[in-house]
Image (cartoon, coloured by chain):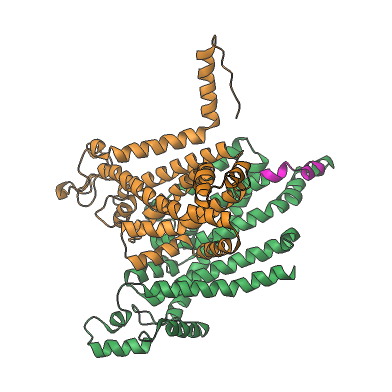
């Protein structure tokens, strides 16, 4: 059992290290000379060379990676070519907006998805179940930037109930968070229904019913608790797709978060920023996956002894 | 599946009822297949169906609201939106073929080798997959597009790379269960080589669930590819790609909402068709395969 935890905990820094290497290597493949971009197109060769040696770009690849890692440990992610500000500072400025948006959407998706899924399972085969399933498959198929634009047109442009763009008040959260939550809540609802249906037909549920427990008690105390493992797994996996979806949602709503920063960075070939955001995103996904593993290990003792 | 016995005396009547009953039971499958078929035909027959050249500009008729003869209206260059949306179906087919095709060709053999050989090979491949899973799809795609440069083909390469793990994992799990089955052991006993066993015996029997997965990911491919084009990282204007058309139309939201409405509806309809079809196929196959 101690082995299980040891393996899980050791895997985190290892996978982070490999991911950081991959990102570092991938970003070096970006077209264009970063020293030239930084110095400016008109700068003469001497200036470009001095920038290159200042950035350490004249050193061998392995040494560059070592410097990169050392800086990373000090929270230094390099300087943005576009704004000439430290990348860490820019990320720190934008990250709270992305975090707030994804947290609200995530909470919404989990609440709506699990409730809809559980009720669909309880009323399986009836109208409510069909309704939930039709909504879920449509929710998984809808182009969220399309829905976002239509909602913006109706609620922000025509009715003016919510602000059109940006993140100025709590009202600004309504449209982006609903748009972003749509896909994960559809996926969670389907998974939740499927795992509840698996469990509802088990013998111990029949026993609980035979004991004379109320339906609500049977579903909440017995069925939902046992269906929790696949649900938590799928919820954790959806956090990654939520972070990805945020890129598009932020662009549509002009949300001042990391997703938009990343899209802008690609346009300007601002490689330090691309690198920093990708690293942060991957670190978050790894952390969430680890948290899911820990939670499942705590809830289900069978897994630890595998 | 229930077997229906037809008697010759009541055959026409029974056949009709059975037909309706099975249609109702598989309504996802039927609806999905119909939508996919319509999109497929639209793309193939676009040159015949489109009333206008999708790229022909005519500034004198710019920004016409949907009406006759331009039933989806015209854009800022006076191009006929209906023709552009029809031609968009061709690009959607290209996106699906290229992205799903590349992911299948790389992901499936990798998964089969991983499952069949086991041991260190399996460990390394599994580890690589876990690593890829740590990158959210779009973020990985943006990173790859940043390296390759924005463009339709480059965005498709990016999408296929992040869909590889899905196929690898599925093919691995299927191979793990199939390699225990008697006919595979018999083939091995007869002296068949690894490649022969993998492609003749395992792949053939794993093909159905892999195709279901391909149908389901095809829906995601359409959404992601048009999303990247919408961000300006995929297909570039003036290409009649649905996402790129929406990026254009976005600037005229509220004034000419139809410019975003029709391409977006086409994306959603296509994704819905593929998801329904994949779902319906999976339900039919489920009793035999439970890939986990």
Q: In the figure, residue A78 lies in which quadrant?
A: bottom left
What is the x, y in percent for residue A265? 36, 71
- In the image, taking residue A259 as reference, residue A192 lies left or right, namely right
Q: Residue at x 34, y 61 (%)?
A: B233
| Residue B254 visible from this viewpoint | no
- For the residue pair B278 and A148, the one nearer the viewer reads as B278
Secondary structure, magenta segment, majority class? helix
Q: Residue at x 74, y 62 (%)?
A: A305
What is the x, y in percent for residue A164? 39, 60
Question: Which tint is chain A?
Answer: green
Question: Which tint is chain B?
Answer: orange
| Residue B173 visible from this viewpoint | yes
B38 in relation to B132, above or below: above
- For the residue pair B23 and A106, the one nearer the viewer reads as B23
What is the x, y in percent for residue B169? 55, 55
Residue extending furthest top?
B9
The magenta stretch spans which residues? Answer: A197-207
Q: Residue at x 64, y 54 (%)?
A: A231
- In the image, taking residue B254 as reference, residue B132 lies left or right, namely right
* Residue A298 belongs to the span the image colors magenta: no
* Residue A205 belongs to the span the image colors magenta: yes
- In the image, taking residue A29 as reference, residue A223 lies left or right, namely right
- For the residue pair A251 and A303, the one nearer the viewer reads as A303
- For the residue pair B193 and A176, the one nearer the viewer reads as B193
Q: In the figure, residue A47 lies in which quadrant?
A: bottom left
What is the x, y in percent for residue A25? 42, 74
């Amino acid at each position: 059992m101690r082995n299980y935890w040891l393996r899980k905990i050791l895997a985190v820094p290892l996978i982070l290290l490999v991911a950081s290497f991959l990102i570092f290597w991938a970003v070096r493949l970006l077209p264009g000379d970063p020293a030239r971009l930084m110095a400016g197109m008109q700068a003469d060769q001497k200036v470009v060379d001095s920038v290159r040696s200042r950035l350490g770009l004249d050193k061998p690849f392995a040494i560059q990676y070592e410097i990169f890692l050392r800086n990373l440990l000090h929270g230094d992610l390099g300087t943005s070519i576009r704004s000439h500000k430290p990348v860490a500072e820019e990320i720190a400025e934008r990250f709270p907006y992305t975090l707030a948006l994804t947290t609200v959407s995530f909470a919404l998706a989990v609440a709506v998805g699990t409730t809809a899924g559980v009720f669909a399972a309880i009323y399986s085969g009836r109208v409510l179940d069909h309704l939930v399933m039709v909504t879920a498959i449509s929710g998984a198929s809808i182009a969220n930037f399309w829905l976002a634009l239509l909602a913006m047109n109706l609620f922000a442009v025509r009715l003016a109930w919510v602000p059109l763009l940006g993140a100025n008040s709590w009202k600004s959260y309504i449209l982006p968070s609903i748009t972003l939550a749509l896909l994960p809540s559809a996926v969670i609802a389907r998974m939740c229904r499927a795992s509840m249906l698996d469990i509802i037909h088990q013998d111990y549920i029949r026993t609980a019913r035979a004991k004379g427990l109320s339906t609500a008690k049977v579903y909440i105390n017995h069925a939902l608790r046992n269906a929790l493992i696949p649900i938590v797994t799928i919820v954790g996996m959806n956090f990654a797709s939520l972070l990805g979806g945020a890129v598009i949602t932020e662009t549509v709503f002009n949300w001042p978060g990391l997703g938009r920063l990343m899209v802008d960075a690609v346009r300007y070939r601002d490689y330090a920023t691309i690198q920093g955001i990708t690293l942060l995103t991957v670190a978050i996904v790894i952390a969430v996956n680890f948290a899911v593993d820990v939670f499942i290990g705590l809830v289900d003792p069978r897994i630890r002894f595998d | 599946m229930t077997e229906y016995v037809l008697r010759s005396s009541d055959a026409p009547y029974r056949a009709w009822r059975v037909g309706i009953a099975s249609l109702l039971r598989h309504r996802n499958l039927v609806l999905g297949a119909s939508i996919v078929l319509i999109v497929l035909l639209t793309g193939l027959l676009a040159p015949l169906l489109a009333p206008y050249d999708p790229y022909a500009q005519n500034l004198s008729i710019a920004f016409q609201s949907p009406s006759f003869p331009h039933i989806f209206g015209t854009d800022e260059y006076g191009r006929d939106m209906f023709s552009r949306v029809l031609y968009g179906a061709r690009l959607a087919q290209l996106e699906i073929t290229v992205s799903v095709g590349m992911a299948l060709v790389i992901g499936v053999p990798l998964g089969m080798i991983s499952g069949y050989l086991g041991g260190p090979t399996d460990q390394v491949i599994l580890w690589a997959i876990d690593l890829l899973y740590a990158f959210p799809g779009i973020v990985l795609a943006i990173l790859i597009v940043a390296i390759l440069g924005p463009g339709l083909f480059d965005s498709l390469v990016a999408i296929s790379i992040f869909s590889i793990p899905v196929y690898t994992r599925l093919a691995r799990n299927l191979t793990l269960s199939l390699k225990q089955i008697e006919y595979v052991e018999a083939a091995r006993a007869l002296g068949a080589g690894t490649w022969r066993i993998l492609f003749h015996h395992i792949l053939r029997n794993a093909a159905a669930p892999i195709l279901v997965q391909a149908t389901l990911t095809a829906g995601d491919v359409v959404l992601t590819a048009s999303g990247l084009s919408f961000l300006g990282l995929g297909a570039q204007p003036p290409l009649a790609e649905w996402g790129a058309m929406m990026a254009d139309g976005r600037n005229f939201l509220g004034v000419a909402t139809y410019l975003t409405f029709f391409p977006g509806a086409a994306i959603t309809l296509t994704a819905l068709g593929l998801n329904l079809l994949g779902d319906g196929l999976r339900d039919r196959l489920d009793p035999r395969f439970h890939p986990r």
